[in-house]
Amino acid sequence: MTFKAIKVVIITEKVIFDGVAQIIEDAGGTGYTVVSAGGKGSRGVRPTNRASIVDAFRNVKVEVIVSDHDVAEQIIDTVAARYFDDYSGITYLEEVEILRPHKFHH
């Protein structure tokens, strides 16, 4: 049996990852996944080739699943307010279905 939850996706600069992780934890997120990211957006192309960029300026994609829509909105609102005036980033929410809902409650 599956249960409805919200996946928060944040794509931003690696240099602010620690702050983003703290926002997730402060909001009640019980964990997250982070992977290297690249692509093209309003601030240009972000390559994923290790030889072509300095590691500190690499983009990351952070995903966190929460059971409460208000928690999801708190995370994205806080990240955007704190960082997106000075750093590139995008964030969005997706409805997902999960197993083991107890893993996603604070």
Image (cartoon, rainbow, N blue to C red):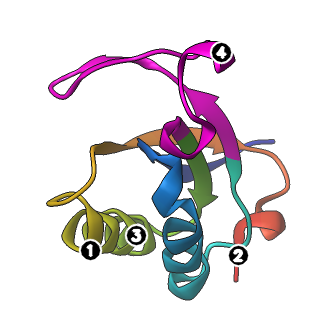
Gap between marks 3 and 1, in whole Å? 11 Å
| Residue 105 badge | 2
- Name the secondary structure under disc 2: loop
Which dot, 3 or 2, sits closer to the camera? Answer: 3
Residue 23 visible, this angle = yes
Residue at the disc numbered 1: 82
Circle 2 crowding by C-alpha within 10 Å: few under 14, some 14–19, many from 20 = few
Seen in the picture, residue 104 relative to 15 is either above or below; the reply is below
**Residue drawn at the location 49% of the way across and 67% of the way down:** 20
Question: Where in the figure is residue 83, as x and y percent of width and height?
Answer: 28, 65
Q: Earlier in the sequence, mark 4 or mark 2?
A: 4
Question: Where in the figure is residue 60, as x and y percent of width and height?
Answer: 55, 40
Residue at the disc numbered 3: 75
Quarter of image, res 11: top left
Q: Amino acid at mark 4?
A: Ala
Q: Look at the image and tell me in which quarter the C terminus lies.
A: bottom right
- Name the secondary structure under disc 3: helix
